[in-house]
Image (cartoon, rainbow, N blue to C red):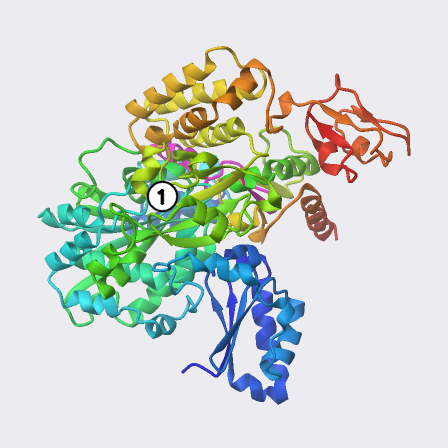
Amino acid sequence: MSKEITVNVCLGTGGIAGGGIEVLSGFRRELENNGLNGEVGKRCEATQVGCRGFCARDVLVDITVDGETSTYQYIKPEMVPRLVEEHIIGGTPVTKWLVQDDYAQFHDRQKKIVLADCGKIDPEQIQAYFEVGGYASLTKTLAMESADVIQLVKESGLRGRGGAGFSTGMKWELCAANRENPKYIICNADEGDPGAFMDRSVIEGNPHSVIEGMCIGAYAIGSQNGYVYIRAEYPLAVERLQKALEQAREHGYLGENICDSGFDFDIKIKLGAGAFVCGEETALIASIEGERGMPRAKPPYPANKGLWGKPTIINNVETWANLPPILKNGAQWYASIGSEKSKGTKVFALTGKIRNTGLIEVPMGIKLRDIIFDIGGGIEGGRLLKAVQTGGPSGGCIPQAHIDMKVDYDNLLEIGSMMGSGGMVVLDETDCMVNISKFFLEFTQSESCGKCVPCRIGTKRMLEILTRITEGKGRKGDIELLIDLGNDVKETSLCGLGMSAPNPVLSTIRYFRHEYEAHINHKHCPAKVCKKLLTFFIREDLCTGCGACAKACPTGAAAGKKKKPHRIDTSACVQCGSCYDVCKFKAVLKE
Amino acid sequence: MDAETVEKLEKIYQRYLASEGNCISVLQDIQAEFGYLPRETVRWFSKRSGIPESRFFGIATFYTQFHLKPRGKNIITACCGTVCHVKGGHRVIARIHDELKLKEGQETTRDKLFTLEKVNCIGACSIAPVVVINKKVGGMMTPGKIARELKQYRGKDSE
């Protein structure tokens, strides 16, 4: 089946944005036209693969000749002819375009279970999934008693990867015990956390693993109907999932009488209409039912009363994708990976001010230091690490002092953050923590559905306080007020959104109180981010008088004679920072 | 409303009956047909189906996907995710506002050539800041780069 020479081009969203489609078609064209009148082309296969993880180096291309794989980085369409000429036809890799040592370093500390086949197989071909043992776990499951499947998942120690970390096996057991029918299975792919793209990458890279996981879950609890609730902002993931569902149906892994076992199950796609709160399970259910996506009080939990009032299991994309490997290798194998209370691995989207941004999968309990400095390669531009933000708008910041903490569900909670769905944003010394917490609160405040008072009004008031602090109008007692208000909102809100919305504020106050105090007492932003607290001026010895700042200035505050040093009139300046951005000579300073 | 519009709506209504659809799918269908949700179409549908208007508008205003006003020819989607924010996405967005001469709260340019929309996160954080123009993802955006891109779209349309 596979050819002697294979070319794999990364076509995740990152790869496509980097010109991956043109690179792939370039390879196909070159191989067809050139290469000894297409002779080489016949032995050759160029395919797309999903996200390779190391998105910072896109477009990544693997060329395998006689079992020997070379990986290239930053490939552009115009580089393709030379690769075909020298490597594929000539047999000598183009050394200067190959990945460097840091590529191996990026992968060394990782352990890939969910992402094992992402970036290796063509996500649009079920055949490629078969070649890596796809759907074997489902066949195995169908030969087991459903109670044994649940027991096995329980013993594996798998916890929900959507953020809260509830035991997956226990949730299933609750639902299976309910006699009511029909039951529903839902895959939560409404990945709304800003700074997170794990679910998108898994669906784009290996959609069949999610489908297989859902089939296993459906069999375990006795469900015939499944839904994938996915964001409309992920068009590529939707398209690939659609294709995968059709292929699974064609091959008898979905539909009636799956693999002659007498078990029926099918999956429908529901597109999210754009509301962050729909990631909350009861809100998600309301949205599938066609209503405003507003959460309701729990209990009853969806496992007892979910979609259309029937027992429903909702798990996150990553949780579903963990199931085929668990069924294949057994509970003991999975439980042997990770920390005492958090088993297995976790996929993180490692981004922000870090050298190697991308998608990573690490064993639970790994030290934060290893993630940031070994896998991530340290901070961009040699600046200092300030904090790592996890859990998005529901999580908090881990300060540099806790860099040696072990990352798992419980440790993160203890430190005032949370696992969340797995976004990990690295912040350096040029980031203002007050500004960051304001950013997250702006987000949760606008995404609050408005049903319960603490969340609707509490977040609004908190945002007002934060806004005045960043504008230099902070008052004495504002910090205490934020803490009070934050704790009230946490304790009294209806759903997870409100219960976690104050986390970014509370955790930054806990670890970076001095920054808040500097803003309030000295009207000073230590990281020089909050514009209203800055004064812009021009260093005359560096200014060449090019006039770029004067052109960019919206108020005419920056002005001067041609070829003579310019000046900024602070009384007219609105602190927009345009002059700072356009100055090529670093003559504009802010203080 | 003209006969043609009514015919289109009647089709959507029949589809709604046949597929046991829900309010969201009806609004999605109307928007797919007209590009946005014209008030009178929702009103018509409400009368036809007996579902109160308020329920439709309650849903339409809840989800960011629905638009109550006509949109521009080119859709610019600016990512406002965490990473885009810390990497200077707000400066890119400010530049788009300047270039298109959009006022605070205004989304569509007067000539209906551009609509600027903000999205929470499109999950392409590795190449932040990100701006999507008509589904084409552009990464590592800077104020200068976006200004050049916008000019291209202007050029295309004036030809």
Identify which amino acid the numbered label 1 is placed on. Lys
Read off the chain for label 1.
A
Q: Is residue A357 above or below residue A491?
A: below
Q: Is residue A349 above or below residue A60?
A: above
Q: Residue at x 87, y 29 (%)?
A: A565
Q: Is residue A70 left or right of residue B103?
A: left
Q: Compare residues A45 and A257 and report the one nearer the observer.
A: A45
Relative to A402, A514 lies left or right: right
Q: Quadrant of residue A509?
A: top left
Q: Which residues are magenta?
A: B52-81
Nearer-the-camera pick, A541 or A135: A541
SS at mark 1? loop
Along the horizontal axis of the image, is A582 left or right of A346?
right
Q: Which residue is mark 1?
A: A406
Up/down of A401 relative to A94, above or below: above
Q: Residues within 10 Å of mark 1 (few under 14, many from 20)?
A: some
Q: Residue at point 32% right, 25% down?
A: A490
Residue A21: give x, y in percent of width and height: 56, 65
Residue at left 26%, top 54%? A226
Q: Is residue A572 visible to us here?
A: yes
Between A123 and B155, the one nearer to me in the picture: A123
Which picture quadrant has residue A272? top left
Q: If the image is split into quadrants, where does the N terminus of chain A sit? A: bottom left
- Residue A24 in magenta stretch: no
